[in-house]
């Protein structure tokens, strides 16, 4: 690990990437490779832990090291990785406990589980956690925050077959995911206030943020994110449900990492957002309610993991309350308690996992007297429980004392709270002592041997206990000698939270007979009394409490809210959405007309642009064009061929219009596309069903309905047309404000061509053209795929009447497509004589158009279409089989070649160090011919040519092939 | 000329809108192609109509917008024509396939 040497400290990006890469590698392992997966995970965690540990000197005295990686410089976006005391502390917690969980999970998970998948999720989760913690940019933080929600979903739902795991995972994702979105919104508001998402800038603008009118909004949104993640009342309910996860996941996510993210966020933004009454009331009250409520509920739970879950919620409430007190000293205590809680709670979860693993149950009512059977595990669990209860000489005691001291002495609180807070703190302490006693005494003492447990318990494998050993040892060591062991770390971690000089505090064990000590003693005595009372009346109290609380239970509320949301969406789907295309189009058109009228009303005046003088020929042309359009609209229902021809007239006149107003390229393209569209529809006409038979009853009422519907549609159509006409006239008579002659000026010097439109397509806007080619190719392939399994309507399966009439007299596949040996002589004789000639001519024209395309009207696109038309003409004249016997056309290959060519030309510029699709002109000296200009744009254009030719051929021949295919008749249809 | 073209755009739009509101698939196909003519003409006309300007760069004529037509709307329309063709082809085949599956020529997939 050279990267972790002090001389070249391990960069944070490398730490995050290490876990992300390890996750990907583990994913690739076979399902049974649990040792390999564990080894990779463990090695990554150890390497990262060492690398990060060696960087402690950097942050020891308040140092901050920030790495910026430019991402989108033009948008001022960068990835910022930030290492300060707080992030270092969280990073070490995440990686360190992560390493222990990796070891623990290796022995916890059964060989039947897909273990590598577990490690892949876990490693991914670690990467996301570290990304959140190290983020120096709020947007980045919100992104990784959501990533942790997503990965926790996968981890909680690891046992995918279990219903409770599915439900717990979904609930956790919904609650924390929605919270994450609120956080994102809040972060954006803060970003709008400050003008930057950089955490340093936000902290530096703290006064400005707090004075801003949007501060309450931003605060509420951000707190929603933090409270959902840290399971504060009333969003706490997902945490007990998430206990369906494997215990290593609970030990990791629900003690040390994910639920701490909310607290982390509050600590991270403490210098920016705290210090206001709003902060005090919102954060403080949420913390206080959670602290008391969860401690009380924990007392009544019988599942060991549920007890721990509520205890976790309660301790998180304590930390949130401390952060809400607006006092620097309380903030220090909060940071301290984060560390302590992570150690004792992770070890407790692991101990419960061992108990579960060895006895087969987690039910407090079934377990007892385990101490004699599992003395080592029992000792460890007892010490950790004592730390949770706040017994002296353990780490939990120290932070609890700091909390009690703050509860009494904090001066930043309003007077009304002054006496209430110490009482609440003592009550919370009592609750904590009581559920710890119940946990410890219920499981480990009492009648010898376990009653009816599914398995006979014994000590677990040695290495399964090691992680618990390490954590409990840490609890003990910190509890005995806090100042030398944890002092510098705590100071470093708390400094960025306080955001200024650290307040004076002492980590001594013995402060003399002080009020906090008295409160501790009271809590111990009261907690014991509470425990005894609970043993006697617990069952009755619990049942009564559950009845009373069930109406306010978040779990129930959540379930009913989800049910109501689904009902709502059902109603919307039923009443507001229509699967019918007709109604949707109607809505689109009406909305477009209404919005257009409302926004443009009174502002569509005629401009002063000089008009082009009227020409009688043009008027005549468009008179025909309009007749064509209206005629097509008139005839489209029953006379499809006439409608198609009439629409074709309009299309032709459109292309004349283009040439009239100096747009030769457009005219060429429009003309060829027009021919192609007409061919396409002509081929498709064969498969369209004949005139719809009369349906339903045509009485007076149905006629009236139809009349009303048609009148409505005529009104809408005329309104839309009139609107467009007015708009078009207004636009044409005005000078456009923003026009650029950039392309004109640069066409020759920059693009090497005189045909500006073509240069734009293949060069300036090459990326657009590339996308367009992809669209066309995709359409062609979709058409091909759709038609491979095409089932025509039953009534068109038989040959059309015209073909039936000549069936006996010829054997061409045009007439009798199925199984004709050759083209019958005498059929379409004129056309068949001309068609080969036209193919040759179209080849020449295509080449001509292609070669001149860069400097004169033409180009690869038009050339491709002309070539395709020439080829399709052969199909029409000779029939599909005849043509395909003689010419091997491979449209799909052409499409592929074209796409690759376009991509290769574009990517070629990357190789020589220019942006994608930069064109280049090569000057080649050819003997006898002289200097020849070969632009890379030329190769691009060849690609376009191939794409267009391949796509159009594929579309139309797929349709044509339907005639020679044997169709399966749809049964009963 | 502007009046004529504006009228033409209006009529094409009307005919197109009327057709796309109809229930039969073929009407929809023709309607969409009429609408795309109208829209293409409209986008093209944004650059301003001109009968006396060069579209291709000529030596000796300063390349600016007073001497040449505006290439930007033209390039946009060129792309639009191609996409319009692709859309028509796809729509046509989808309606054919839907006819075979649903057994009706109604655009909604069932007679209402």
Image (spheres, coloured by chain):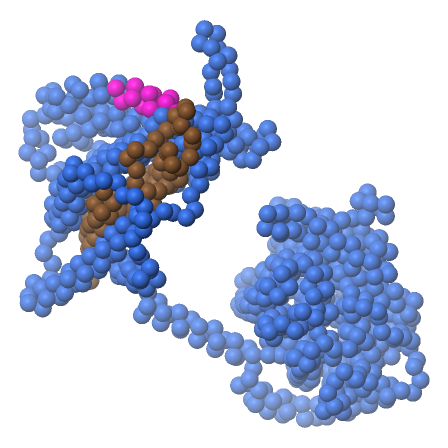
Chain colours: A blue, B brown
The magenta segment is A841-855
- The answer to whether any part of residue B42 appears in the image is yes
Residue A607: percent from the left, percent from the top? 32, 51
Q: Is residue A91 left or right of residue A186?
A: right
Placement of B105 over or under A493, stated as above or below: above
Query: In front here: A27 or A444?
Result: A27
Q: Quadrant of the N terminus of chain A?
A: top right
Q: In this view, does B6 lie to the left or right of A363?
A: left
Residue A535: percent from the left, percent from the top? 71, 90
Please, which residue is most extreme toward the top here?
A928
Determine which quarter of the picture holds residue A125.
bottom right
Placement of A899 over or under A350, stated as above or below: above
Q: Is residue A662 left or right of residue A774?
A: left
Question: Could you tell me which residue is drawn at 55 percent across and 84 percent down?
Answer: A552
Residue A844 colored magenta?
yes
Question: Could you tell me which residue is drawn at 69 percent across and 78 percent down?
Answer: A276
Query: In front here: A918 or A321?
Result: A918
Determine which quarter of the picture holds residue A602.
bottom left
Residue A824: percent from the left, percent from the top? 13, 22
Residue A901: percent from the left, percent from the top? 46, 29
Question: Could you tell me which residue is drawn at 93 percent across and 84 percent down?
Answer: A512
Residue A682 colored magenta?
no
- The answer to whether any part of residue A148 appears in the image is no
Determine which quarter of the picture holds residue A855.
top left
User: Is most of the magenta stretch helix, strand or loop?
Assistant: helix
Question: Could you tell me which residue is drawn at 75 percent across and 61 percent down?
Answer: A87
Query: In front here: A382 or A124?
Result: A124
């Amino acid at each position: 690990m050279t990267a972790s040497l002090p001389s070249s400290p391990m960069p944070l990006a490398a730490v995050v990437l290490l876990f992300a890469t390890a996750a990907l590698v583990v994913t690739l392992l076979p399902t049974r490779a649990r040792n390999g997966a564990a080894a990779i995970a463990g090695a990554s965690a150890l390497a990262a832990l060492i690398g990060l540990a060696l960087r402690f000197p950097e942050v020891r005295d308040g140092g901050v090291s920030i790495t910026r990686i430019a991402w989108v410089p033009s948008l001022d976006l960068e990835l910022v990785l930030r290492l300060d005391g707080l992030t270092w502390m969280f990073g070490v917690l995440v990686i360190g406990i992560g390493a222990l969980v990796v070891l623990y999970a290796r022995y916890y998970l059964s060989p039947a589980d897909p273990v590598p998948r577990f490690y892949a999720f876990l490693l991914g989760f670690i990467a996301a956690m570290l990304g959140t913690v190290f983020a120096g940019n709020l947007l980045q933080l919100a992104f990784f925050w959501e990533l942790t929600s997503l990965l926790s979903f996968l981890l909680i739902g690891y046992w995918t077959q279990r219903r409770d795991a599915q439900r717990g995972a979904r609930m956790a994702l919904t609650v924390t995911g929605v919270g994450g979105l609120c956080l994102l919104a809040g972060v954006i508001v803060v970003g709008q206030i400050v003008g930057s998402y950089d955490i340093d800038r936000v902290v530096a603008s703290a006064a400005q943020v707090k004075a801003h009118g949007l501060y309450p909004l931003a605060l509420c949104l951000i707190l929603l994110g933090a409270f959902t993640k840290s399971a504060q009342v009333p969003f706490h309910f997902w945490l007990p449900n998430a206990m369906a996860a494997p215990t290593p996941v609970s030990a990791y996510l629900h003690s040390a990492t994910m639920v701490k993210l909310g607290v982390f966020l509050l600590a991270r933004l403490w210098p920016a957002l705290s210090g206001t009454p709003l902060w005090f009331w919102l954060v403080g009250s949420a913390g206080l309610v959670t602290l008391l409520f969860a401690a009380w509920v924990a007392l009544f739970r019988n599942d060991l993991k549920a007890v721990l879950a509520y205890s976790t919620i309660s301790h998180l409430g304590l930390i949130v309350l401390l952060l809400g007190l607006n006092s620097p000293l309380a903030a220090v205590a909060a940071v301290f308690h984060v560390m302590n809680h992570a150690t004792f709670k992770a070890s407790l979860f692991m101990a419960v996992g061992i108990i579960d693993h060895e006895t087969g149950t987690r039910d407090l009512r079934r377990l007892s007297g385990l101490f004699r059977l599992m003395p080592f595990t029992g000792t460890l669990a007892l010490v950790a429980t004592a730390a949770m209860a706040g017994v002296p000489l353990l780490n939990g005691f120290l932070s609890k004392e700091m909390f009690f001291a703050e509860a009494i002495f904090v001066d930043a609180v309003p007077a009304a709270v002054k006496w209430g807070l110490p009482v609440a703190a003592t009550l919370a302490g009592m609750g904590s002592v009581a559920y710890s006693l119940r946990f410890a005494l219920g499981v480990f003492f009492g009648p010898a041997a376990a009653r009816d447990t599914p398995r006979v318990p014994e000590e677990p494998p040695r290495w399964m206990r090691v992680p618990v050993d390490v954590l409990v040892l840490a609890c003990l060591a910190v509890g005995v000698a806090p100042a030398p062991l944890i002092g510098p770390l705590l100071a470093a971690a708390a400094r960025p939270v306080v955001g200024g000089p650290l307040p004076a505090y002492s980590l001594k064990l013995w402060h003399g007979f002080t009020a906090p000590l008295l409160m501790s003693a009271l809590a111990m005595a009261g907690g014991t009394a509470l425990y005894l009372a609970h043993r006697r009346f617990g069952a009755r109290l619990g049942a009564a409490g559950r009845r009373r609380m069930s109406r306010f239970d978040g779990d129930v509320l959540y379930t009913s809210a989800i049910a109501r949301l689904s009902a709502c969406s059902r109603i919307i789907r039923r009443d507001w959405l229509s699967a019918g295309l007709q109604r949707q189009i109607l809505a689109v058109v009406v909305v477009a007309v209404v919005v257009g009228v409302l926004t443009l009303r009174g502002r569509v005046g005629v401009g002063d642009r000089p008009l082009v003088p009227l020409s009688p020929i043009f008027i005549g042309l468009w008179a025909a064009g309009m007749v064509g359009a209206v005629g097509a609209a008139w005839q489209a229902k029953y006379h499809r061929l006439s409608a198609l021809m009439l629409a074709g007239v309009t299309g032709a006149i459109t292309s004349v219009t283009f040439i009239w107003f100096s747009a030769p390229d457009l005219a060429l393209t429009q003309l060829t596309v027009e021919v192609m569209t007409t061919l396409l529809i002509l081929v498709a006409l064969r498969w369209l069903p004949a005139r719809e038979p009369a349906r339903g009853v045509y009485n007076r009422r149905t006629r009236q309905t139809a009349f009303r519907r048609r009148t409505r549609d005529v009104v809408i159509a005329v309104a839309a047309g009139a609107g467009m006409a007015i708009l078009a006239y207004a636009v044409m008579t005005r000078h456009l404000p923003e026009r650029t002659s950039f392309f004109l000026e640069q066409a020759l010097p920059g693009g090497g061509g005189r045909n500006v439109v073509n240069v734009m397509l293949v060069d300036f806007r090459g990326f657009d053209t590339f996308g367009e080619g992809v669209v066309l190719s995709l359409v062609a392939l979709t058409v091909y795929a759709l038609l491979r399994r095409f089932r025509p309507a039953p009534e068109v399966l038989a040959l059309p009447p015209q073909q039936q009439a000549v069936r006996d007299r010829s054997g061409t596949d045009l007439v009798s497509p199925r199984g004709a040996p050759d083209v019958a002589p005498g059929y379409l004789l004129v056309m068949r004589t001309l068609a080969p000639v036209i193919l040759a001519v179209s080849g020449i024209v295509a080449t001509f158009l292609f070669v001149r395309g860069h400097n004169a009207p033409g180009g690869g696109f038009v050339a491709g279409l002309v070539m395709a038309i020439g080829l399709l003409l052969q199909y029409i004249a000779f029939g599909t089989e005849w043509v395909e016997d003689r010419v091997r056309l491979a449209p799909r290959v052409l499409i592929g070649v074209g796409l690759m060519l376009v991509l290769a030309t574009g990517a070629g510029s990357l190789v020589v160090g220019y942006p994608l699709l930069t064109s280049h002109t090569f000057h080649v000296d050819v003997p006898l011919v002289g200097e020849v200009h070969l632009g890379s744009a030329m190769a691009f254009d060849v690609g376009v040519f191939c794409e267009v030719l391949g796509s159009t051929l594929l579309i139309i021949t797929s349709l044509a092939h339907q005639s020679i295919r044997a169709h399966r008749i749809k049964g009963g249809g | 000329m502007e009046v004529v073209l504006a009228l033409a755009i209006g009529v094409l739009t009307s005919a197109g809108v009327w057709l796309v509101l109809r229930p039969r698939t073929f009407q929809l196909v023709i309607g969409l192609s009429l609408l795309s003519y109208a829209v293409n003409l409209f986008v093209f006309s944004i650059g301003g109509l001109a009968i006396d300007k060069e579209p291709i760069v000529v030596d000796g004529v300063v390349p600016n917008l007073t001497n040449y037509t505006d290439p930007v709307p033209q390039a946009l329309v060129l792309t639009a024509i191609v996409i319009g063709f692709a859309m028509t082809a796809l729509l046509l085949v989808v309606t054919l396939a839907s006819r075979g599956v649903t057994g009706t020529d109604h655009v909604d997939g069932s007679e209402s």
